[in-house]
Image: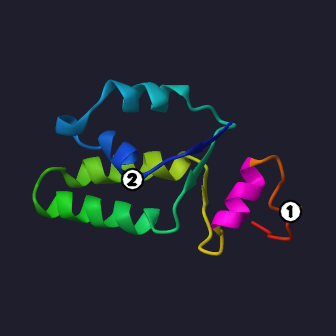
Amino acid sequence: MDWVLDASMALAWAFPDEKSSEADRFLGMLTTESILWVPAVWWYEMANALTTARRRQRLTEAEVMRLTELYGILIFERFLPLLTTRTLYFQASGGSLQDEGTKI
């Protein structure tokens, strides 16, 4: 199943003081067939958050490595900047991006 993941949900898995039952439940629902769609800037947001957390000693180096491995085993696709509102509407109304001539 395809899911859209934003940085705040992924970071809820990282920080003990930001844990949420919703984030944990979502992580538990993921399977090897799950595909996570993320915004194009997602990796930059994550790198910035983890770097800042390490610098502020919110996470240890070992925790950053564990999280990097976790994020690395998940299958990510990213939204391309060229996706327009029209393209998203087209897909949401039953078309596919390939039908519109946009290759992902």
> Whole-Å distance between the Cαs marked 1 and 2?
27 Å
Residue linked to disc 1: 98
- Is-magenta flag for residue 87? yes
Examine the image and state in which quarter residue 23 appears: top left
SS category of the residue bearing label 1: loop
- Is-magenta flag for residue 45? no
SS category of the residue bearing label 2: helix
Locate the N terminus by quadrant.
top right
- Tell me the residue at 60%/63% (across/down): 79
- Tell me the residue at 26%/49% (across/down): 62
Task: Give the number of the mark in front: 1 or 2.
Answer: 1
In the image: residue 87, left or right of residue 65: right
Q: Position of residue 83 (x, y in %)?
A: 65, 69
Examine the image and state in which quarter residue 17 appears: top left
Examine the image and state in which quarter residue 15 appears: top left
Residue linked to disc 2: 7
Q: Which sits in the foreground, 50 or 87? A: 87
- Tell me the residue at 24%/65% (across/down): 51
| Residue at the limit of the structure toward the right, as seen here | 99
In the image: residue 84, left or right of residue 21: right
Q: Provide the major secondary structure of the magenta segment.
A: helix
Q: Which sits in the foreground, 7 or 102? A: 102
The amino acid marked with disc number 2 is Ala
Q: Position of residue 13 (x, y in %)?
A: 34, 39
For label 2, the crowd category at 10 Å Cα-Cα, with few meaning under 14, some 14 to 19 and many 20 or more, is some
For label 1, the crowd category at 10 Å Cα-Cα, with few meaning under 14, some 14 to 19 and many 20 or more, is few
Q: Is residue 24 above or below residue 34?
A: above
The magenta stretch is: 85-92
The amino acid marked with disc number 1 is Gln
In the image: residue 70, left or right of residue 100: left
